[in-house]
Every structure is written in C-alpha cells, then in structure tokens.
C-alpha cells in the first residue's frame, strides 16, 4: 500500500501520468483538479517566515536581480549574541526592499525545513522510487528569472500562487549529464511551448530540456512556484558503482604493468583483468545496482521523545521508500535498506496499517488488527522505520493524506 497523498494524486491526474515506470521523455503541462490545494502546500508569507526563522547561507538561498545573482552580503546580516556567538540571518528589511523593487528569491531543499513539503517529497519518492528535493522560487514585480538553461534531472513545476511566463525548448543533446563527454551550451531554436503559468498549473520538464521563467512582461504582481526535482540512475552511475565493487577483488587492486616492461606479462595481465571485469559485469547487473542504491539518501531527522512525555498515541512510517513486507510460513519480515525485522504472521494486518505511509492511531491498529498496536509501534519507532506523530509532524499530513482513525 502506497501513501495516499492528495497533491501527488492531483499532479498525476493533471499530467495524465499513471505509472512511475512510464516516466515521459517529453514536456507535459496540465492543471490540478482543484487549485485550492496550493495554499495548503505553501504560501508566500509562510515561505518568507521559513526564511526569517532560519540561519541560511548561499548557495542554499540565493537572490537574483536582472538575471544576476546578488552577493550574499547584500541580503545577510550577522547577529551577534552578548557572548560573541555569530549567526548569519536574512536581513528582512533588506529583503523587503529587494522584493519591492523586483527580484527572484530561491531556497533549495525546503523539504528539510517545512513538514508539508517534507511529506510531499516522501510521497513522491514512494511513487517514483527516486530521491526527490523541493526548491521554491518567489519572484516579484517584473523581475527576470534564470536565463535559458537545462537541468541534469527531471523537474515537476507546481505554480503555487501568482503567475509567470515560461518558455520550454527541447534538448540539444540526448540525455545530457552534469559531468559529460561533450559540452551542451547551445539551445535549440525551436520552442516546444511558451505561455503563462497560473496558480494550480503543473509542468513536467524532462532532463536536458532548455527552459526559462520570467515576469518581465507581467508588471506588478508576484509568482511563487515549487520544483520537485528527481534524478534517475543511468548506465554511467552503474559503471561507477561497479568500479567501487571492483575494489573487493585483488586483481583490480594490483598495479598495471607498463607496456615497456615484459610484453608477455603485460598481455597476460591485460587478459586477466578483462576476464575479471567481464565476470564483474555479469555478476552485478544493473538490477542489482538499482536495488542496492534504492535507499541511498540521507536519513531523515525526526523528533524522538523516547517516552519521556508519555508513550506515542500515533505513528507514521518515515522510510525514504516503501518497506518491503515479505511473508513466509508463520512469519512476516519487514525489510528496509538497512535492516530486516521478523514478526509473527498474525502481525501482518497491523504492519499493513503501520507501514502504509499514512498516519495511524495505535489504538485503531489494536482494534482493527486484533494485536497490541502500541507494542508493535514501539518496535518500529525504535528501529527508525516509523516516527511518533508529534503535532508538528502531523501538520505536514493534515488535509493531504488519509488518516488511520486519528
């Protein structure tokens, strides 16, 4: 069972994107069934509040005017405590002036700060099976955004408030990469789509597609949009992973003989390493690589009270990707990237509720599954598979996911 998240469900509907395996290779656009969900995700004032209350530095937070990035010192001030501790904080008065004159403010990885976007990114990850990061862009007045560029990852753009002009072109190099064998600096002349993106509109921009967004023709007003970026694994990634696997075998760690030395020995060494490389390729196919790195994202941070303030009444699964539930005989195993926990088979209905990705009340688990939900939840929280549902964490799910009788 996958997390039932309204935003992801609506984006899939808007883009007619039914299966994660059918990642489109062309530009798509659509509109959410109900744009009223947008302020629930993020508003301009809540975005500014996030910025005000955190110590942020470049390049995570950037500000642009006239397509040029401003020096961080034009936006930051150093707050010094009476004991001399210095903390960089955004000067909100300076920022207000920049917003009034027209600028583009960018904050990367907002899902690390905001529970609503954190939950949305996890729901995307559970569906796409790829790491997802949310960046947010606030543009005011007739400010320009970035110049025409391409990204080395796929992007889903959600217009949260206001409006903006977009231009999208196709790729000028098939499947370009950040670190590539050839430059990719000349955009194609043909425009795939250009127009105004309004609140609730969704764009899907595949890797390598050139694009830009601006308000230069819009005059007064503003734009707030979020980009959900996700990176698919490539054959180059697989080969790089294989290089790391090769370190386990002595033949790959040995010195290579130079051509000027014994020619016969040089030939034998070459043949030996080629045979070993061929064996490595066949014994570690791409499927093994994808399985091994499926959970290769940094562990999330969650409040754990360890029962100091009383036992949790509700929990939620917080793994980066859906845990695997495997049944065999009288047992059921929960497998994640880091661990495997075995329970009795009678725990299966309860595990289905607890590992759904949706918040669930432990009393409801007990009554619905006929098992001690509190004890089972305690184990999953201790193992880092679930987290206790604090009010702050729950705020990221409220109104966007189904709940387990909360």
Image: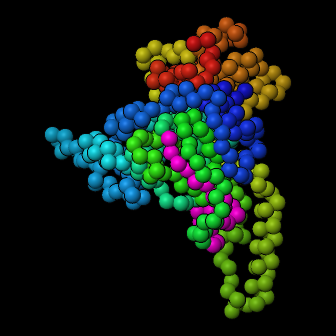
Q: Position of residue 28 (x, y in %)?
A: 68, 46
User: Do we see residue 225 in this rendering?
Assistant: yes
**Residue 291, percent across and down?**
72, 46
Q: Is residue 85 left or right of residue 183?
A: left
Q: Is residue 324 magenta?
A: no
Position of residue 137 in the picture relative to residue 333 (left or right)? left
Above or below — where is 291 with respect to 151? above
Nearest the eye: 337 or 156: 156
Extreme residue toward the right, this view: 329
- Magenta span: 163-182
Residue 133 coordinates in the image, percent (x, y) = 55, 44
Q: Residue furthest top?
A: 367
Image quadrant for the C terminus?
top right
The answer to whether any part of residue 110 appears in the image is no
Q: Quadrant of residue 71?
A: bottom left
Q: Is residue 216 above or below residue 20?
A: below
Q: Is residue 176 magenta?
A: yes
Q: Is residue 187 left or right of residue 53?
A: right
Instruction: Name which residue lies at 61% across and 17% down.
Output: 403
At x 63%, y 20%, the residue is 402
Q: Residue at x 59, y 69 (%)?
A: 186
Q: Nearer the viewer, residue 232 or 13?
A: 13
Judge whether 23 appears above or below 339 on screen: below
């Amino acid at each position: 069972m996958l997390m039932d998240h309204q935003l992801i469900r609506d984006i899939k509907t808007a883009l007619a994107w039914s299966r994660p395996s059918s990642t489109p290779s062309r530009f798509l656009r659509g509109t959410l069934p109900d744009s009223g969900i947008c302020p629930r995700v993020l508003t301009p004032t809540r975005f500014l509040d996030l910025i005000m209350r955190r110590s942020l530095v470049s390049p995570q937070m950037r500000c642009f005017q006239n397509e040029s990035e401003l020096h961080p010192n034009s936006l930051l001030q150093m707050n010094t405590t009476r004991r001399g501790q210095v903390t960089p904080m955004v000067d909100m008065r300076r920022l207000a002036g920049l917003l009034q004159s027209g600028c583009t403010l960018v904050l990367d990885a907002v899902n690390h700060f905001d529970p609503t976007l954190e939950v949305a990114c996890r729901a995307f990850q559970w569906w796409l099976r790829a790491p997802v990061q949310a960046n947010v862009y606030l543009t005011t007045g007739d400010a320009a955004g970035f110049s025409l560029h391409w990204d080395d990852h796929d992007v889903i753009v959600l217009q949260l408030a206001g409006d903006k002009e977009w231009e999208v072109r196709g790729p000028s190099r098939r499947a370009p990469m950040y670190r590539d064998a050839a430059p990719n600096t000349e955009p194609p002349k043909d425009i795939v789509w250009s127009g105004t993106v309004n609140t609730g509109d969704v764009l899907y921009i595949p890797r390598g597609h050139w694009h830009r967004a601006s308000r230069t023709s819009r005059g007064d007003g503003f734009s707030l949009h979020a980009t959900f970026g996700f990176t698919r694994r490539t054959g180059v990634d697989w080969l790089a992973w294989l290089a790391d696997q090769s370190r386990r075998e002595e033949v790959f760690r040995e010195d290579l003989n130079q051509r000027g030395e014994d020619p016969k020995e040089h030939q034998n060494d070459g043949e030996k390493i080629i045979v070993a490389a061929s064996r490595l390729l066949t014994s570690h196919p791409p499927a093994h690589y994808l399985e091994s790195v499926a959970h290769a994202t940094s562990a999330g941070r969650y409040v754990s009270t360890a029962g100091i303030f009383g036992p949790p009444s509700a929990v939620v699964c917080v793994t980066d990707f859906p845990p695997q539930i495997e049944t065999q005989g009288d047992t059921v195993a929960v497998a994640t990237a880091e661990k495997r926990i075995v329970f009795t088979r009678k725990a299966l209905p309860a595990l289905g509720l607890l590992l759904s990705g949706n918040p669930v009340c432990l009393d409801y688990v007990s009554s619905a599954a006929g098992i001690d939900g509190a004890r089972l939840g305690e184990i999953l929280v201790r193992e880092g598979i679930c987290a206790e549902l604090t009010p702050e964490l729950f705020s990221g799910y409220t109104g966007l996911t189904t709940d387990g009788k909360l």
